[in-house]
Structures are given as structure tokens and as C-alpha cells.
Amino acid sequence: MAARALIACFAITLLTATVVTTSPAPGHEAALVSASPANGSRLAAVQPALVLVFDGLVDPGATHLAVTRPDGTPAASETFAVDGRRLTMPLPTALDGAYSVAYHAVFTDGEEASGTIGFGIRANPPIASAHHDHVERSAANMTLLAIDAALFVALLTVLRGRSRVRAPRRFREKWVLRDIDV
């Protein structure tokens, strides 16, 4: 009986892994497509606005954007305009130095993109990463998750199928009496 359950569990695991790895991921991988000023750029003069372009339609109510100086103080107001895939934030006109732009864009389909870019105005830009992902959705990760789930189910099946060997009642009573007499 346990062998049949194990074979069935293996077949379900194989089927699940095949379906998970061959099906397309829901939605899309949200990402920043371009930034102006570009990440790592050194500008000779101030641009009138910061522009971030994403690969999906941005939800203005759930998106956050902040421009900060190296000491962490805000360098611009946090108000920005959203036009489809484009975020635009006006920049102050007389600010030399290095700036970081932290963004967290939420798209209308529920996907998210977060990251930090940096630029400098008549100064070297801060070191910043273009973006980061909180969860990597790859076929390998999904396959490993399916295998883990199947192994868990197989373990439960094997443990549940094991019968307990118990001594007959008359022997159990004698053992109890013997334990009490000692």
C-alpha cells in the first residue's frame, strides 16, 4: 500500500513540476525602463524634472518617489505626476551635489518595481543600484517548491500508512502491574 502511495505521490510531483515550469508566469516582470537623469550620470546643469519610465501602467495612488541628498534630507517635494507609464517630478533649480532617487512603483495589474538610482549635479553621483527584486519567479524555484511539497506529502503518506504494533491487552496489563510492583 505504501509503495502505491509513494508512486502516486511521485507522479503528482512530476505532473505539478511539468505544469509549473511550462506555464507562463502571471503578469510581467515589472521594471524601470529608463530614467532621466540616467542612473550614474553627472550633469553640468540642473534638469527641470526627473522622469522615470516603467514597462507598465503606474497606479499613482500606490506609488512612492523620493529624491534625497547624501545626508538623507529631502531634495525635492514628493509630489509627482503620472502619465501612463511615466512619472515626472520637478527638480529644484539651484542644487549642486549628489542625489539618490528611491522609487516604489505599483502597476495597475498589481506588479511592483522598487529600486534606487543616483545622479550628480556638478558632482559625482552616489553609488546606487538600478533596482532590486523581492522575489525571484523562476522555473527552477517553482520546480523546487513543487518537489518540496511532494516530498512533504509523501512523508505524511508513509507516516500515516505505518501501522502501530501494540502488544495484546493481557500483556499490557501485566507490564503495568510489573512496573507498579517495582
Image (cartoon, grey):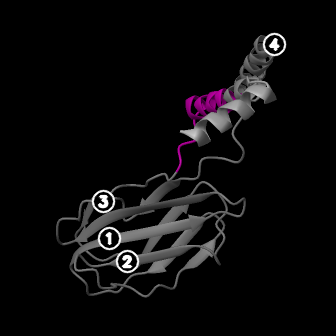
Query: Which structural element holds mark 4?
Result: helix
Q: Residues within 10 Å of mark 3 (few under 14, many from 20)?
A: some
Does residue 96 lie above or below 11 as drawn? below
Numbered badge on residue 4: 4
Mark 2 vs 4, N-terminal side: 4
Along the polypeptide, which appears first: circle 1 or circle 2? Answer: 2
Disc number lying in front (3 or 4): 4
Q: Where's residue 182, x and y in %?
A: 53, 39
**Residue type pointed to by label 3:** Ala
**Which residue is located at x 76 percent, y 11 percent?**
3
Q: x, y (%) of residue 29?
A: 60, 47
* Quarter of the image that includes the N terminus: top right
> Where does label 1 land, which residue?
100
Q: Tell me if residue 23 can be seen.
A: no
Q: Nearer the viewer, residue 139 or 24?
A: 139
- Residue 57 lies left or right of residue 80; in this view the side is right
User: Label 1 vs label 2: CA separation?
Assistant: 6 Å
Residue 140, label in figure? none
- Please report contact status of discs 3 and 1: CB closer than 8 Å, yes or no: yes
Pointers 1 and 2 in contact (CB under 8 A)? yes
Quadrant in which residue 83 is drawn = bottom right
Number of the label disc, if any, that sits on residue 128 = 3
Mark 2 lies on residue: 67
Q: Residue at x 74, y 24 (%)?
A: 167
Compared to residue 109, the image places residue 4 above or below, namely: above
For marks 4 and 1, give the CA distance.
60 Å
Closer to the camera in the image, 126 or 87: 126
Q: Earlier in the sequence, mark 2 or mark 3?
A: 2
Going 48% across and 75% down the picture, which residue do you hit? 65
The magenta segment is 135-153
> Of discs 2 and 4, which sits in the foreground?
4
